[in-house]
Image (cartoon, grey):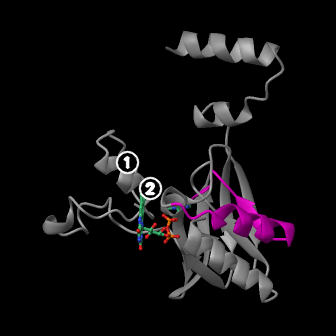
Amino acid sequence: MQGFNDAIVDALTQAGANLDNFKASQGEVAKEAVEESYDVVVVGAGLAGLSSALTALQNGKSVVLIEKMSVIGGASAMAGAGVVSSLSKTFTDNGGVLYTSVKADELIVNEGKVVGVKASSTANDYTFNAPRVILATGGYGANNELVADQYKAFVYAGAECYWRCDCNGRTTKCGFN
Ligand SMILES: Cc1cc2nc3c(=O)[nH]c(=O)nc-3n(C[C@H](O)[C@H](O)[C@H](O)COP(=O)(O)OP(=O)(O)OC[C@H]3O[C@@H](n4cnc5c(N)ncnc54)[C@H](O)[C@@H]3O)c2cc1C
């Protein structure tokens, strides 16, 4: 398998592709540490996260919005919330910072107070410092421990949960799980 991967990397490199992200995901290059500071960090770019991020921005705050998937929208987009793309455009057009494929891993807590978020992508380990953190990571419908037995067959609280109900075997969970 390694030989196969190496052959693909060689071929793509010769074709001029930048494979830093791929190599980082394979553990071949060290991730770069990135530290940034904002007034507000919002985690999750579904409707709740986009609305919160835009509202904070419109109130004069510097805002970073991070989304673990490569596309924004979450369950909101799957449920047909067409406003997702216009919210995100208004957000970024007005100076909001949006990262996709960046997953929040843990909250930074100092003396009992949340002061930021640690997050990661295939290429970077992020430290986002902020006195305000908004978690908008959807529901916990994919968390078997949290969903009572009688609701397991019905609850969808995130895109992944929906897929799980579709029996495609996708098991990534919502939120920080
Ligand atoms: C097919 C479908 C139909 C629906 N129909 C209805 C309906 O008719 N009526 C109704 O009231 N509700 C309905 N819902 C539910 C409704 O869409 C959701 O409750 C709502 O969209 C949730 O919005 P949200 O912003 O809280 O979460 P989401 O839109 O799920 O956004 C959460 C985002 O957070 C991201 N995220 C999660 N963890 C992390 C992390 N650690 N780091 C970074 N990002 C993270 C996710 O990838 C996602 O993009 C439906 C849902 C689906 C899937």
Label 2 residue near ligand 1, CB within 8 Å: yes
Callout 2: helix, strand or loop?
helix
Packing grade of label 1 (10 A; few <14, some 14-19, many >=20) is some
Residue 127 locus on image (x, y percent): 67, 65
Residue 40 in view here:
yes
Residue 81 is inside the magenta segment: yes
Q: Residue 74: give x, y in percent of width and height.
A: 53, 59
Q: Which mark is residue 159?
A: 2
| Vertical side of 120 occupied by 91: above or below | below
Give the Cα distance between marks 2 and 1: 6 Å
Three-letter residue code for mark 1:
Trp
Q: Residues within 10 Å of mark 2 (few under 14, many from 20)?
A: many
Q: Which residue is mark 1?
A: 163
**Residue 133, image x, y percentages:** 60, 80
Tell me if label 2 and label 1 are in contact, CB under 8 Å.
yes
Magenta highlight range: 80-104
Q: Position of residue 33 (x, y in %)?
A: 71, 54
Residue depicted at x 28% and y 42% = 167
Kind of element beneath mark 1: helix
**Three-letter code for the amino acid on which mark 2 is drawn:** Ala
Compared with residue 7, is residue 56 higher up or lower down, i.e. above or below?
Answer: below
Quadrant assignment, res 108: bottom right
Residue at left offset 84%, top offset 20%: 16
Q: Is residue 34 covered in magenta?
A: no
